[in-house]
Image (cartoon, rainbow, N blue to C red):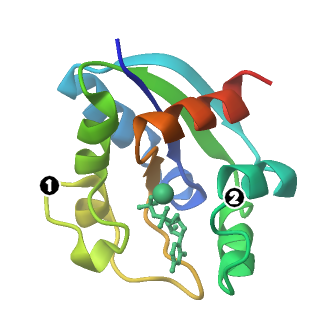
């Protein structure tokens, strides 16, 4: 069965949306395989977002992502990688459709970063890479 990595970001945790996000995962029929609340270290964040480390806005992302605990997990199900990305909606909440997590619970970029409640791996290869970084070390 396909697996993907997901995360409820610090804004989602602070706003009391852990249950809401997990509810959507379970309602859809996906299975929560791993779940872990933790603070992100700079090292883990740089590995997780390795393609963004050199961007000028990375310090803002780092400040946001380390501003409080995240809930990281693995979910499984048929075509879960693509489905979970669809359930998240567009990266910029202003472009995310109603009915998606980002479209229902987030609005505009906040400060220097886009605070958009939750994360999902963008491909099978990313899912494998991110699961290894977060859960197999
Ligand atoms: N991000 C940001 N500013 C940008 C691009 C990305 O703050 O200009 C943040 C945002 O939280 C986003 C994350 O970095 O969700 C990862 O970016 P990516 O392009 O991979 O978007 P995602 O896969 O999360 O939709
Ligand atoms: Mg991404």
The quadrant in which the C terminus is found is top right
**What residue is at 69 percent from the left and 24 percent from the top?**
135
**What residue is at 21 percent from the left and 55 percent from the top?**
100
User: Which residue was labeled with disc 1?
Assistant: 99
Q: Does residue 123 lie above or below 93 as drawn?
A: above
Coordinates of residue 51 in the picture (x, y in percent): 63, 63
Q: Is residue 114 left or right of residue 70?
A: left
Q: Does residue 47 lie above or below 111 as drawn?
A: above
SS category of the residue bearing label 2: loop
Most distant residue in the top direction: 1
Q: CA distance from mark 1 to mark 2?
A: 30 Å
- Which label lies toward us, 1 or 2? 2
Q: Nearer the viewer, residue 127 or 104?
A: 127
Coordinates of residue 114 in the picture (x, y in percent): 49, 75
The quadrant in which the N terminus is found is top left
User: Which residue was labeled with disc 2?
Assistant: 50
Where residue 84 sits, quadrant-wise, is top left
Where residue 111 sits, quadrant-wise, is bottom right
């Amino acid at each position: 069965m396909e697996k993907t990595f997901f995360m409820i970001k610090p804004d989602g945790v602070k706003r009391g949306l852990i249950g809401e996000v997990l509810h959507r995962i379970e309602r859809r029929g996906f299975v929560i395989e791993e779940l872990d609340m933790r603070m992100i270290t700079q090292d883990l964040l740089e590995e997780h977002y390795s393609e963004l480390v050199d961007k000028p806005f990375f310090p803002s992302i780092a400040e946001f992502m380390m501003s409080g605990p995240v809930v990281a997990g693995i979910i499984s199900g048929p075509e879960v990688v693509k489905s979970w990305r669809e359930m998240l909606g567009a990266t910029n909440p202003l472009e995310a459709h109603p009915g998606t997590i980002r479209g229902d619970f987030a609005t505009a970029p906040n400060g220097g970063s886009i605070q958009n409640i939750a994360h999902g791996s963008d491909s099978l290869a990313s899912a494998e890479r991110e699961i290894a970084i977060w859960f197999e070390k």
